[in-house]
Amino acid sequence: MSDDEEIILSELSDDELVQQMFDDLYDGLKDEIVEAVNILLERGWQPYDILTKALVGGMTIVGHDFRDGILFVPEVLLAANAMKGGMAILKPLLAETDAPRVGKMVIGTVKGDIHDIGKNLVSMMMEGAGFEVVDLGINNAVESYLEALRREKADILGMSALLTTTMPYMKTVIDTLTAEGIREDYIVLVGGAPLNEEFGRAIGADAYCRDAAVAVETAKEWMARKHNQMAAG
Amino acid sequence: MPDALTALLAERDWILADGATGTTLFNMGLQSGDAPEFWNETEVDKIRALHSGAMDAGSDLFLTNTFGANAARLKLHDAQDRARELSRRGAEIGREIADAAGRPVIVAGSMGPTGEIMAPMGPLTHEEAVAIFQDQAEGLREGGADVLWVETISAPEELRAAAEAAARAEMPWCVTMSFDTAGRTMMGTTAEAMTRLVEKLPNPPVAYGANCGVGASDLVRTLMGFGEASRPLIAKGNAGIPKYQDGHIHYNGTPELMAEYAVMARNAGATIIGGCCGTTPEHLRAMRAALESAEKGPAPDLAEVSAKLGGFSSDSDGLDGRAPTRDRSASRRRRPQA
């Protein structure tokens, strides 16, 4: 089909529209995503179905291509921005329904570090996967993480550091969780450019996540394990 | 009169730069979360020791302790108004050490990224970024830096802003980007794209290249990706991969590995060769000895690089036509070109 042919979203069938939303998310077209979400709502779709089938579906493709080195940060920011446009409509509607809860994450960049690009990407992709995310921003001391984890009854703690001078602070936070006897209450995920798997293990995190797409996959995996444990316990 | 770096490059086939700043200061007791730049005032002897360590190991050029001395970064410590002063102070300490060397040693005024995403994707406008960098650049000039050293950059927009700041501060400058994501910068810039980018600037840098990133092998591949460079190339790679040992970050690259890397980096086209995170004076000594004892050889092929320095972090660097792509022939709208 030629590039200059006008696409009328409202004339597409549901399947075609969802497919088109995948493309429009990939291309970071916010207005088109907002329009498509409204069309699906008018057609009687449940907000939760729009979230999981259209938005999460589309963002999964974006996440995979980011992981595989096909897309880079600027493209992912555009895609996430488009998704946010759709989420702004769905969020109040989801709150009114008994939509299943995927999980809740408290995330922040550690003390001394102002780099929040990676952390923001993780937040966006986690929201894109249906998680609730409480973003503490940059420069977080151990107290701020602990307070937020308790207040929010979170499942997951995400910490990010971009500097070799700030990454050891993650261990301070994990050690404090252990000292207070609450380490096992949370899934602890860490990420950031200078980190690696071995570092994550050495400081006592549950997992190191190489990028935002891996963070989402890891979070889902650990949430499933947590549910299994709870069922078994 | 040419600037001091250009003059030194005219005399020498290669020059040895320094190693790590952040990880070295850590080992001197810097606490996680503290701004290293405050030490330009409170722990001057330790900063002197940092520079002397590199210089005594044979470095011809070292970077000032001013990586994060810009208003955007210092805001975090409520010191956004002190960027110029801390930059000046950092350059002064460097000047003092370099002048006592008894041989030409270049004081390179380190300028790290703002840490913010630039417009239109993020909040930082070009004008704001130029102002932030200019403030720091002028402090570095006042403190006696020979050249500005813009490093660890990911975004082309930020590189352009730093270039403009260097022009406004009337300073010669160098720039390195960090190629840490599938052989490209986090923002997707390939090595070849960086060459095109710097050559198009109204005030191109004295030298450009790569720093930090993933490991020594990736860095050598990046050097070869720059293509035909019409100015000196810089290589400042990490000493391996970080590991956490006994409360400290330790990089696993040995002095022998870094010596091998230095020789390969020169063969791959680099003229200014140093290390980044994890590179100690011991590494630098081994690098110097290796560069002095070996003749410059032909550019290595990738198989040789990975055999000697370890495997690459990604199969492709985005320049070999083997980078992964997505078939979009079925899609009807396309991403507008940014």
Image: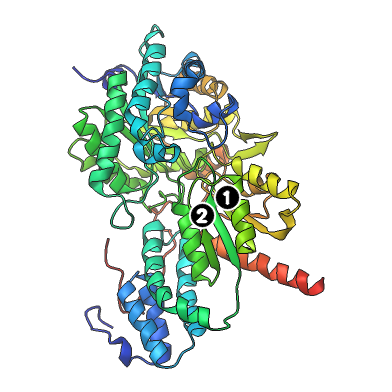
Q: Is residue A58 left or right of residue B158?
A: right
Circle 1 residues within 10 Å: few <14, some 14–19, many ≥20: some
Q: Please tell me in which quadrant of the rendered image residue A182 appears.
A: bottom right
| A2 to B84, vertically: above or below | below
User: In the drawing, what numbered circle is on residue A144?
Assistant: 1
Residue at 22% in and 29% down? B169
| B52 to A80, vertically: above or below | above
* Front in this rendered view, residue B95 or B242: B95
Question: Which percent across, then down, holds residue A103?
Answer: 61, 69
Q: Is residue A218 visible in this depiction of the protein?
A: no
User: In the drawing, what numbered circle is on residue A136?
Assistant: 2
Mark 1 is on which residue type?
A: Ser
Q: Secondary structure at mark 2?
A: loop
Question: Which percent across, then down, holds residue B148?
Answer: 31, 28
Residue at 77% in and 69% down? A229
Q: Is residue B338 visible in this depiction of the protein?
A: yes
Circle 2 residues within 10 Å: few <14, some 14–19, many ≥20: some
Q: What separation in Å lies between label 1 and label 2 (alpha carbons)? A: 8 Å
